[in-house]
Image (cartoon, rainbow, N blue to C red):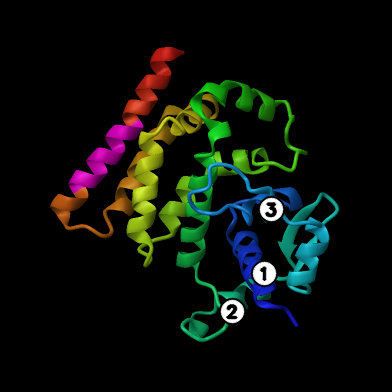
């Protein structure tokens, strides 16, 4: 029988494993479940003591660890059960929803991308390290950096209109307007085409308009896109 802390850990792991856009490794999951909102660095006390064993202990027989160290659910039926809409609202610790899972993951990724070690001054060196494969084996925040840079906006968009919608919007606006987003801009400029910028802007515009009337949506989206466009201009003007 799992205690309350183990159940919470199990839920976190299952959210990430079933919702992530790509397979995550043990090290990545260890960092992902340790991130807490408003953190500025990884709290080593929150990291799993024995990651492989801890994951198996709380999630067996629902997940498995493969030979390449990635973690996955053992069968698609596990995900179908966890996200069965007929169980929503029930007092069950293992009843999940795509909206809440994507909201929590979005918030965690935006928090991680706002860590002090990812400030603009360090961005070029960090991207170079990741390109040559360095830091990928380290049990530190960089283990999730590439995933966060590529996918945070996708999780935001797929979170829909959740009870935490406004909180996530505020977190998003703060991130995009801050120097921490410079690393994301640099990553986009380095790895994506110009069309990707426009696509992301449009998708985020549609998502952020969910809550507001037309006038309110226009005001917020204009502010958000202005921040993104300004950051992009800043990056391109320096290069």
Residue 38, given in percent of the width and then of the height, sits at: 48, 49
**Crowding near the residue tagged with mark 3, few <14, some 14–19, many ≥20 C-alpha atoms within 10 Å:** few
Q: Residue at x 78, y 72 (%)?
A: 60
Q: Residue at x 78, y 39 (%)?
A: 137
Query: Quick one: SS at disc 1?
Result: helix
**Crowding near the residue tagged with mark 1, few <14, some 14–19, many ≥20 C-alpha atoms within 10 Å:** many
Residue 117, given in percent of the width and then of the height, sits at: 58, 32
Q: Residue at x 43, y 60 (%)?
A: 159
The label shown at residue 93 is 2
**Crowding near the residue tagged with mark 2, few <14, some 14–19, many ≥20 C-alpha atoms within 10 Å:** few
Residue 121 visible to the viewer = yes
Q: Is residue 219 left or right of residue 177?
A: left
Q: Quadrant of the N terminus?
A: bottom right
Which residue does the numbered mark 1 point to in the structure image? 10
Pick out the residue farthest to the right: 67
User: Spatial distance from mark 1 to mark 3, Cα to Cα?
Assistant: 18 Å
Q: Which residues are magenta?
A: 218-228
The label shown at residue 172 is none
Foreground pick, 3 / 124:
3
Are discs 1 and 2 less than 8 Å apart at CB? yes
Which residue does the numbered mark 3 point to in the structure image? 45
Residue 199 visible to the viewer = no
Q: Give whichever of discs 3 and 2 has the lower sequence position.
A: 3
Magenta stretch encompasses residue 82:
no
Q: Main secondary structure of the magenta part?
A: helix
Q: Quadrant of residue 64?
A: bottom right
Query: Quick one: SS at disc 3?
Result: helix
Q: Is residue 50 left or right of residue 101?
A: right
């Amino acid at each position: 029988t799992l205690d309350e802390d183990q159940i919470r850990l199990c839920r976190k792991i299952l959210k990430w494993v079933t919702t992530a856009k790509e397979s995550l490794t043990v090290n990545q999951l260890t960092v992902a479940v340790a991130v807490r909102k408003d953190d500025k660095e990884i709290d080593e006390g929150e990291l799993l003591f024995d990651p492989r064993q801890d994951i198996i202990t709380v999630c067996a027989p629902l997940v498995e660890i493969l030979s390449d160290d990635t973690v996955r659910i053992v069968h698609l039926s596990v995900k179908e059960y966890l996200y069965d809409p007929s169980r929503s609202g029930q007092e069950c610790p293992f009843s999940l929803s795509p909206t809440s899972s994507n909201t929590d993951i979005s918030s965690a990724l935006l928090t991680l991308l706002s860590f002090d070690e990812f400030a603009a001054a360090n961005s070029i060196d960090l991207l170079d390290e990741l390109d040559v494969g360095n830091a990928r084996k380290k049990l530190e925040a960089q283990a999730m950096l590439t995933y966060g840079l590529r996918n945070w906006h996708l999780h935001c968009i797929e979170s829909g209109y959740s009870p935490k919608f406004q909180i996530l919007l505020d977190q998003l606006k703060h991130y995009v307007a801050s120097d921490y987003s410079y690393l994301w801009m640099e990553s986009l400029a380095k790895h994506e085409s110009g069309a990707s910028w426009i696509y992301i802007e449009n998708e985020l515009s549609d998502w952020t308009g969910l809550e507001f009337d037309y006038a309110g949506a226009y005001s917020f989206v204009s502010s958000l896109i202005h921040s993104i466009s300004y950051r992009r201009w800043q990056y391109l003007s320096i290069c």
